[in-house]
Amino acid sequence: MSDSQVKTQSLYAKQQKIHAREVDGFFSRIGKSTALWLLTVYYALPWITWTGRQAVLFDLPARKFYIFGITLWPQDFIYLSWLLIMAALLLFLVTTVAGRLWCGYACPQTVWTKAFVWLERLALGNYSKRKKLDKAALSRSKVARKALRNFLWVSFAFWTGFTFVGYFTPIRELGSSLVAFELGGWETFWVCFYSFATLGNAGFLREQVCKYMCPYARFQSAMFDRNSLIIAYDTARGEPRGSHKRKKASEGKLGDCIDCSICVQVCPTGIDIREGLQYECIACAACVDACNTVMDKVGLEPNLIGYTTQNAIDGKPTHVMRPRTLVYTTLLSLLFITFLYSLFTRNPLSLDVIRDRNALYRELSDGRIENVYTLKVLNKSDETHELRIMAQGLEGLEVETDPANPVLSSGELVVIAARVKVIPEAVKAGGHDIVLTIEAKEDAGMQADRETRFFVPLD
């Protein structure tokens, strides 16, 4: 290798800021529309009212989680775990089939970075103006424009942090407290924390989060195979590179790539896709749109850079349905169906039974045997219910409770003392399995039961 071909790079070189050039095209419009839709959902959702309350609210002090018409409790934590497992499987499935499509179009880092870049463009101008401004000497105009950009960034980041906290504290109350300068300590801390995190990640760090902090880029290779969708440069068609004028002069000896480097200029992570698949590539397809625009101008076929698979590059057929995708799809479908069934058929009454620890049984003055239990009953519905408590498993069981006619309002947890009695002559001595059941008087189908032990003394 000659000295002219040797490249030297310092391990301690200062990070160069990447100013991605603006690009318009099919995939760019999809990305912008997706980002706009996701941001609109995020900022608008807390303001939607549903049956007199905030539609989506995770009320931690009250231990209630409202998602439109569904109210979840800490006891329903399994549904959160269920959702996380399904989200992981969905990510694996999408990555296996479509590569890093999530990164390029729906990842929060990508979505918010696009918003911050748009604000920067609004304050500082387009790609060339921003690069020129960075190189320019310090001046009043430069300070003013940078100050405007920072003001827009900080305002947008604060709005993001405020909205995030609004998912946990009713956002209208939060807004009123903010306007009146009566925001609580914890609310202030979390609004500032998430504002700072948004500003740092999407405003200043940007592609560095994807390249150095995000673990997804590191383990994606375990989910990729030769049928996974990637963005690739057609080396056979594009090489050797050369300008359009040189192509004409060389009578077609050069490839289709005119070496304009626009694919590098539009890349948000600053890579050259012509060097092959790299973990920094987030599959946003900006290079595809940019290259297709150039190919159209010079009268060449599109998709010199495009979505493809390794098999397609090698001239082999691409298979979407394969063992890995079939397994992911089957598991995800089963989990999703059972999740919906469990969620919409879940019991709104929760019952825990604790035996009296002081004595296994008591002999009453009338000869009956009594076992005492503590019942903890939670009403997870939005209505008030009067309860009926029953015992089954032995002949002649009777139940007395304190309070005698327990009533549970929405979200209330009550502790009920239950005394279960039986005539000893009607049962055998020893321990017996019985079932304690609570039932809403106005709806016999709304009930919960627990199995416990009932003890009868030996003769």
Image (cartoon, grey):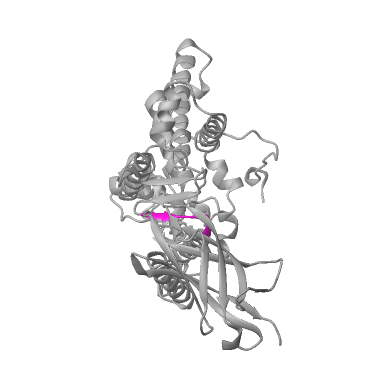
Query: Is residue 281 shown above or below 161?
Result: below
Query: Is residue 158 shown above or below 143?
Result: below
Q: What is the x, y in percent for residue 418?
A: 55, 66
Side of 161 relative to 362 (left or right): left
The C terminus is located in which quarter? Answer: bottom right
Asked whether 106 or 453 is in front, the reply is 453
Query: Is residue 58 shown above or below 201?
Result: below
Q: In the image, is residue 328 part of the stretch drawn in magenta?
A: no
Span colored in magenta: 70-75
Q: What is the x, y in percent for residue 226?
A: 49, 70
Taking the spot 37% from the left edge, 39% from the top edge, the residue there is: 43
Residue 256 in sight in this render: yes
The answer to which quarter of the image holds residue 120 is top left
Q: What is the x, y in percent for residue 59?
A: 47, 44
The residue most toward the top is: 140
Side of 241 relative to 138 (left or right): left
Taking the spot 51% from the left edge, 60% from the top edge, the residue there is: 377
Q: What is the x, y in percent for residue 205?
A: 55, 37
Asked whether 393 or 322 is in front, the reply is 393
Taking the spot 57% from the left edge, 41% from the top edge, the residue there is: 208
